[in-house]
Amino acid sequence: MHSPSLPSGDQKLIQIVNAALADTVARSGKWLACRPGCSHCCHGVFAINQLDALRLRNGLAETEKNDPERAARVRKRALDTVARLSPEYPGDPATGLLDEADDDEDCKRWDEFANDEPCPVLDPVTGTCELYEYRPVMCRTFGPPLMAEDGDLGVCDLCFDGATEAEITACEMKPDPDHLEAALLEELEKTTGARGETIIAFALVR
């Protein structure tokens, strides 16, 4: 089935995020452990929005044209992941949409769900992403210091080992200062009706 087009501003969003990442990498220097083959952040599921999901599906469709064997590997891993996770999925396994966490029990269920599950887009041989160009915003921002919704500055456990708080703060990444992603999500919802969050495996098999 043909996927809808991404909002025209999505490419601008990705350019802004990528530029913010490049700037942070330059400021972080030795403190960043991120490199090809380091797949620490590719284990354990996380929520992605509908922009991310559509970008991934379109990326898989492009890969099927240019490298069908790679696309087949990704799709098989995604299908296998969905089969494993569906019985305990904290949402609707038919649509892939996650439940909204309304109470502490919902939050606990999500926190304990599939924490060791490898991303289906991760090549288990090389430890690299097979849809790297189309990866979610979360994947583009994990590693450098990033301000969380609660106001805490989070950073990958493998990065900034031995750095002072001031050194970490000086390298903070601000990936979307004008909140373009939120506006694009609203546009996508109005255009297609797509809303809610999912995870990568479910996004790829829809």
Image (cartoon, rainbow, N blue to C red):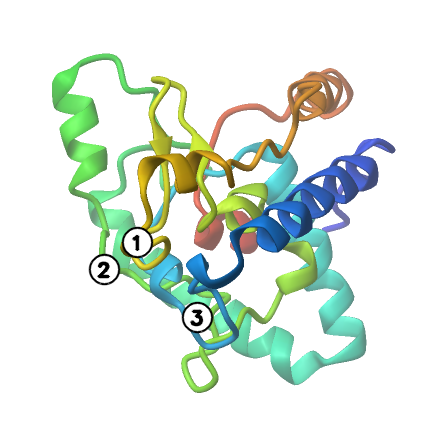
Q: Which residue lies furthest to the right in this view?
A: 8
**Dot 3 corresponds to which residue?**
77
**Dot 1 corresponds to which residue?**
44
Instruction: Decide which of 177, 118 is in the foreground and name it.
Output: 177
Pinpoint residue 125: horizontal percent, then vertical percent.
43, 86
Horizontally, residue 170 falls left or right of residue 2, namely left
The three-letter amino acid code for the residue at tag 2 is Asp
Q: What element carries label 1?
A: loop
Looking at the image, how many numbered discs can be counted on the residues?
A: 3
Of the residues under marks 3 and 2, which one precedes in the sequence? Answer: 3
x 44%, y 34%: residue: 169
The three-letter amino acid code for the residue at tag 1 is Gly
x 59%, y 46%: residue: 24
Q: Do the residues labelled 1 and 2 touch (CB within 8 Å)?
A: yes
Whether residue 94 appears in this view of the structure is: no
Please say if 57 is above or below 121.
above
Q: What element carries label 2?
A: loop
Q: How crowded is mark 3: few (under 14 residues within 10 Å), some or many (20 or more)?
A: many
Real-space Cα distance between discs 3 and 2? 15 Å
Instruction: Decide which of 169, 180 is in the foreground and name it.
Output: 169
Q: Which mark is residue 1?
A: none
Please say if 1 is above or below 175.
below
Horizontally, residue 165 falls left or right of residue 97, namely left
Horizontally, residue 65 falls left or right of residue 177, namely right
Instruction: Decide which of 165, 197 is in the foreground and name it.
Output: 165
Whether residue 10 appears in this view of the structure is: yes
Front label number (3 vs 2)? 2
Real-space Cα distance between discs 1 and 3? 15 Å
The three-letter amino acid code for the residue at tag 3 is Arg
x 45%, y 77%: residue: 127
**Dot 2 corresponds to which residue?**
116
Pinpoint residue 115: horizontal percent, then vertical percent.
23, 52
